[in-house]
Image: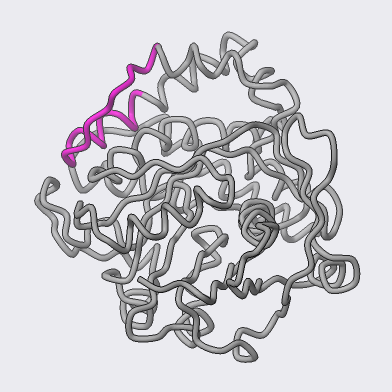
Amino acid sequence: MSIKTICIYGAGALGGAIAAKLASQPGNDITISVVARGAHLDAIRDNGLSLREADAERTLNVRLNATDDPKTLPPQDLVITGLKGHQLAPAAEGIAGLLKDRTRVVMILNGIPWWYFHRDTRSGHPELQFDELDPEGRLWRLIAPQRVIGCVAYQGAEVINPGEIRLSNKGRFVLGEPSGEMSSDLEAIAALLIGAGLSITTTPDIRDEIWSKLMGNAAFNPISALTRAVMTDIMADPALSAMVGKVMNEVRAVGEALGARFNITVEQRLEQSRHVGAAVRTSMLQDLIGGKALEITPLVGMLAALGRLTAVPTPVSETILALVTQLDRENRRGS
C-alpha cells in the first residue's frame, strides 16, 4: 500500500491530534489534509493546528491544508475519520468522494460501529445491518465495509480553544481488519502511525477490543453527561460507582452472547477507573457542555438493541438510555 495523501475527516480533538502528529514528521513527503468546520477550521487556517501532549514541555504547531468541503480535495490514499458515530452517515457522501479503488478508511469510533457484523464469524449474525447506525445503508453502500480498518482509541483529547488540542494521557490505539486478517494494508498503516509517534498495536480480534472499551464508554459517558461529573467523582460516589458496575456487567453479558472475549473482569475495570486523572472529562460531557448532539446510539442505544437481539436483559442501560436521550433533546433545544 502506497500512502502519499491522507485526509483526516473530522479534525476535532482526536482526529486533529493525529493530523498534527502526522504533519509534524520531518522529511515527510505525505500530503496531509483535514476536514473541519466552524471556528476550529478558521483557527487552523489562520494560525495552524496546535497540539499540547500530556507532560510535554512545548506545544506542537503545524500548518496543513484545511477545508470544510471535501470536494475540494483530490482522492486520497488513506482516510482517517475522527467523527463520532452519529456524525458519520451525514458525511458518507463526502467521504466517498475521497476514495480511490484501493483507498482504506481507518474509522476511530466509540461503541458499536456500523460495520460491526461485516465478515463476523462469532455472533451468528454475519453482515447484519442496523438502520440506527447507518440510515438507509448509506455508509455500507457508499464507503463499503471492506474498505474499513477498525480503530479503538484509548486517548483522552479535548479541543480547549479553536485550533488548540490538549491530550490528557499518553494514549494508545488498536487497529484491526473486520475480517481478522493481518493484512499488508493493516501493517502499512500501523507502521505509518508508529512513525508519527503514536502507540499502535494491531489485532486479529478488533471486536473484542470494541467490547472491552465499551465497558467504560457505555457507563461513564452517559452518567457523566447526566451528572456533569468527571470520572473520579463518579467513582468516589458509592451509588454511581455501583451503577457503573451494573452497566459494565450488562456490556459483558451482551458481548459474550455475541461471541466477544474479555481479557479483564468488571472488578478489574472498575479498579482501573479509580485511577484516571481527575481532570478527565468524557467526550459526551464535553459535547453536552458545548451544546452539541450527544453520541448516544453507538454507546448505549446499540447495547440495548443487541441485548434484545441476544435476549440478554439490559435494564440499567435502558433506563440510562431514556434519560440521556431526553437530556440530549433539552440540551440542543437550549443551545
> In the rendered image, which quarter contains the N terminus?
bottom left
Above or below, 183 against 313 in this view is below
Which quadrant, please, contains the C terminus?
Answer: bottom right
Question: Could you say where residue 85 lies in the image, as x and y percent from the top left?
Answer: 49, 59
Question: Which residue extends farthest right?
Answer: 46
**Is residue 224 shown left or right of residue 37?**
left
Q: Is residue 325 left or right of residue 27?
A: left
Nearer to me, 239 or 78: 78
| 200 left or right, relative to 126 | right
Residue 167 point in image, percent of width and height: 70, 40
Residue 268 to residue 313: above or below: above
Q: Residue at x 61, y 84 (%)?
A: 70
- In this rendering, is residue 273 above or below 202? above
Magenta-colored stretch includes residue 157: no
The residue depicted at 78 percent of the width and 61 percent of the height is 62
Is 257 within the magenta?
yes
Identify whether 215 is placed above or below 185.
above
Examine the image and state in which quarter residue 187 appears: bottom left
Please tell me which residue is depicted at 77% across the width and 49% down the height of the picture: 51
**Residues in magenta, as a range:** 249-267
Q: How is the image coloured?
A: one colour
In this view of the protein, which residue sits in the foreground, 266 or 325? Answer: 266
Query: Residue 23 lies in what quarter of the image?
Result: bottom right
Q: Nearer the viewer, residue 335 or 85?
A: 85
Give the total number of marks visible in the rendering: 0
Give the x, y percent position of residue 253. Answer: 25, 29
Q: Position of residue 11 (x, y in %)?
A: 66, 63
